[in-house]
């Protein structure tokens, strides 16, 4: 099943002839380095993460004829309020492989959608280290195996023919706040995995494992120790580098010629309190390159110095080649939560189009950085908050805050959150998903406790504030907007785009449709209702001469789109019609729905809706004692949220099964949020 003798001999011959480096899986190795065609063998299509398919049977002239070729429900795996369905399927030789928010893996016939095998993770349902919904962004493959990371911080290899476990390596301990949500990258005998836990005071890292054995080869820590490169950007004499966050949410990119692996690094911990971590805080909110074989540091570019806004670099870094001033250049780009795309030279990390350090507002108590990088070109979302009644302070990107709530746009959720952008070499454009949302930022401080939430503040969107999105084409050698479409829903933390040689941009939508746009103009050419929140990134493949477009549809709990467990594949020969549209997500922040009368108990995380209150809105008489009970698995709070001011009343963190009773004496409207999940809203109306 592994390399046959013939392939081994051919490989040896290749080394003799070309002096090429030995490849552990010559076939996958070649596909990983080639333009994407019939097969889609790694999360980003190939190691560039461009998500560009050379298939062009489906193009701007006939995309309107696309219909469902098949739709398969994944047996309820990852179906429910606590999950998001964010995985990109892989396809090789007519077989599709997909993972769900429960870390279950399915192999399907890519032509018919029939099940070939399934592997249920059996993962502990009581994990307390999941930051923002259970999800798994996908798989990698090589040497006859599939690789995945699990929420319980294991990296697992499965036999690609049967789904049977080959090895399983804990790269950390979930009880200490760690997990894995990113799809791994396989290349030349090594499996690379990110790690999550940026809201739990972890130490971020890239982990390289031996694909054959699962043994850990090396770790590259995103939080340098004293004396290491960047170690002096943390307060001297502290151990903050051991729990300052800086996690990796997404699949790295790799340039085999340069021998470098590239990845985006998330926010610092505690997110909103910079007072205890003076310095630039490398390598939070950065793009980093290290040697792909040894993990030795090569270069970094920090997008946000001393981050206090939760401005992660979360979306995957994308490698692309372009021409600037007549010179061919090797580029790398990353779409930040700031709303900018950062375009760099991937040989050295220096700006390719231009990025300027500019002075920014200062708050000495937050130890703010003196300057921040401003890319030349255009942002994909507005970067100033609109003033709102009840809020004294509102500002633009990098506005400062302390304990008084301050409106800032983009919110810490993006701009572009984890959603991948794509790059089309024919147009030279990046296709960037964006969220328009304002947050009320406030710092309240926090103490590090191993394995517990470590936020230091919050950033809920003000009650009644508008939320929407943008799709933007950004010139790869200008960083300027080529076209932009406003869309009614937030698309920066779900969906993501894929593009093709048929001049199409493909993406899902929180309303449940998959959509195709003209890559040159952005014109919406086709949409099809999948029946569930279409919040994963599409991919493209070919079987028996027919081109297919596939997408997982199962919603995203952060956006509030409809849950599901479906995978759809579309082709020009498809016969299946659209499903009924599910309820769309909210476009205004705050609790919605009917008001329950005379209720004195509120359950959190009940009915498999982990990230919500039930009832969301309740009316009670003055003097009523209301009991808040966590019926979910993740720690939650009910925390008073009064025009952005947090904590006039507070249950504090409630573990699974725990309760706290609050008495409401004075008539009025009491909004509340969950501080670790500031998109959960509730309201008690006291008469
Ligand atoms: Cu919560």
Image (spheres, rainbow, N blue to C red):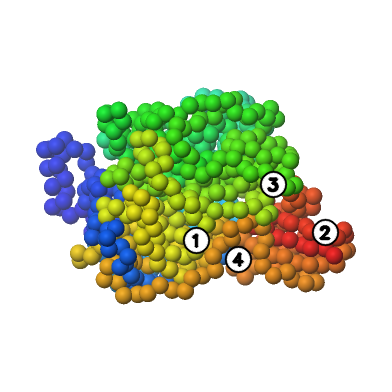
> In the depicted view, which residue is nearer to us: 186 or 464?
464
Which x, y percent locates residue 622? Answer: 87, 64
Mark number displayed over residue 510: 1
Cα separation between marks 3 and 4? 31 Å
From this view, report whether residue 433 is shown above or below residue 370.
below
**Secondary structure at numbered mark 1:** loop
- Which quadrant of the figure contains the C terminus? bottom right
Does the residue at mark 3 contact the one at mark 2 (Cβ under 8 Å)? no
Question: Nearer the viewer's eye, disc 3 or disc 4?
Answer: 3
> In the depicted view, which residue is nearer to us: 372 or 246?
372
**Secondary structure at numbered mark 4:** loop
Which x, y percent locates residue 355? Answer: 45, 29
Cβ of mark 1 under 8 A from ligand 1? no
Does the residue at mark 1 contact the one at mark 3 (Cβ under 8 Å)? no
Cα separation between marks 2 and 1? 34 Å
**Secondary structure at numbered mark 2:** strand
Residue position for label 3: 388
Residue position for label 4: 609
Can the viewer see residue 516? yes
Residue position for label 2: 668
Left or right: where 55 falls relative to 14: right
Residue at figure coordinates x 29%, y 33% from the top left: 323
Which x, y percent locates residue 399? Answer: 63, 35
First in residue order: circle 2 vs circle 4: 4
Left or right: where 685 falls relative to 272: right
Cα separation between marks 3 and 2? 20 Å
Residue at figure coordinates x 27%, y 28% from the top left: 327
């Amino acid at each position: 099943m592994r390399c046959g003798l013939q392939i081994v001999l051919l490989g040896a011959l290749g080394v003799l002839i070309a002096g090429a480096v030995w490849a552990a899986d010559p076939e996958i190795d070649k596909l990983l380095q080639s333009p994407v065609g019939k097969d889609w063998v790694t999360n980003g299509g190939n190691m560039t993460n461009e998500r560009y398919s050379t298939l062009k049977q489906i193009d701007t002239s006939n995309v309107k004829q696309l219909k469902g070729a098949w739709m398969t429900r994944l047996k309820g795996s990852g179906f429910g309020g606590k999950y998001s369905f964010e995985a990109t399927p892989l396809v090789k030789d007519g077989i599709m492989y997909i993972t769900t928010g429960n870390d279950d893996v399915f192999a399907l016939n890519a032509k018919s959608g029939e099940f070939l095998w399934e592997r249920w993770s059996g993962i502990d349902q009581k994990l307390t280290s999941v930051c923002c919904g259970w999800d798994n962004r996908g798989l990698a493959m090589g040497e006859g195996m599939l690789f995945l990371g699990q929420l319980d911080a294991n990296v697992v290899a499965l036999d690609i023919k049967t789904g049977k476990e080959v090895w399983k390596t804990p790269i950390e301990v979930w009880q200490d706040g760690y997990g894995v949500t990113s799809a791994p990258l396989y290349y030349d005998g090594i499996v690379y995995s990110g790690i999550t836990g940026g809201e739990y005071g972890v130490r971020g890292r890239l982990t390289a494992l031996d694909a054959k054995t699962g043994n850990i080869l090396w770790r590259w820590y995103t939080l340098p120790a004293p004396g290491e490169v960047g170690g002096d950007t943390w307060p001297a004499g502290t151990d903050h580098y051991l729990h300052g966050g800086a996690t990796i949410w997404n699949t790295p990119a790799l340039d085999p010629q340069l021998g470098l692996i590239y990845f985006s690094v998330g926010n610092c911990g505690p997110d909103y309190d910079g007072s205890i971590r003076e310095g630039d805080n490398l390598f939070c909110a950065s793009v980093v390159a290290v040697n792909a074989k040894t993990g030795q540091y090569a270069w970094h570019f920090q997008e946000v110095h001393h981050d206090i806004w939760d401005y992660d670099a979360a979306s995957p870094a994308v490698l692309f080649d372009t021409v600037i001033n007549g010179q061919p250049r090797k580029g790398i780009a990353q779409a930040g939560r700031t709303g900018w795309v950062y375009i760099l030279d991937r040989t050295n990390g220096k700006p390719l189009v231009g990025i300027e350090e500019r002075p920014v507002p200062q708050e000495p108590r937050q130890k703010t950085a003196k300057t921040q990088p401003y890319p030349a070109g255009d942002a994909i979302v507005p970067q100033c908050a609109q003033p709102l009644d009840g809020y004294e302070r509102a500002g633009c990107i990098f506005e400062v805050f302390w304990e008084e709530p301050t409106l800032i746009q983009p919110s810490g959720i993006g701009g572009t959150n984890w959603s991948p952008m794509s790059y089309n070499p024919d147009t030279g454009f990046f296709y960037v998903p964006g969220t328009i949302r304002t947050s009320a930022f406030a710092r309240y401080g926090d103490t590090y406790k191993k394995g517990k939430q470590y936020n230091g503040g919050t950033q809920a969107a003000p009650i009644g504030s508008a939320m929407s999105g943008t799709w933007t084409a950004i010139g790869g050698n200008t960083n300027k907007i080529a076209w932009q479409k406003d869309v009614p829903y937030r698309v920066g933390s779900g969906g993501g785009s894929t593009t093709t040689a048929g001049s199409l941009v493909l993406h899902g939508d929180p309303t449940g449709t998959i959509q195709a746009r003209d890559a040159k103009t952005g014109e919406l050419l086709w949409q099809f209702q999948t029946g569930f929140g279409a919040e994963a990134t599409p991919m493209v493949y070919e079987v028996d001469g027919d081109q297919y477009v596939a997408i997982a549809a199962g919603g995203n709990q952060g956006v509030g789109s409809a849950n599901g467990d479906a995978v759809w594949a579309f082709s020009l020969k498809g016969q299946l019609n659209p499903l009924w549209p599910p309820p769309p997500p909210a476009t205004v922040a705050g609790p919605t729905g009917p008001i329950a009368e005379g209720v004195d108990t509120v359950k959190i995380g009940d009915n498999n809706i982990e990230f919500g209150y039930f009832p969301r809105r309740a009316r009670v008489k003055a003097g009523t004692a209301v009991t808040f009970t966590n019926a979910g698995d993740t720690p939650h709070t009910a925390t008073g949220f009064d025009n952005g001011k947090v904590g006039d009343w507070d249950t504090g963190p409630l573990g699974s099964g725990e309760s706290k009773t609050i008495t409401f004496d004075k008539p009025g409207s009491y909004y509340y949020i969950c501080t670790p999940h500031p998109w959960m809203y509730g309201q008690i109306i006291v008469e």
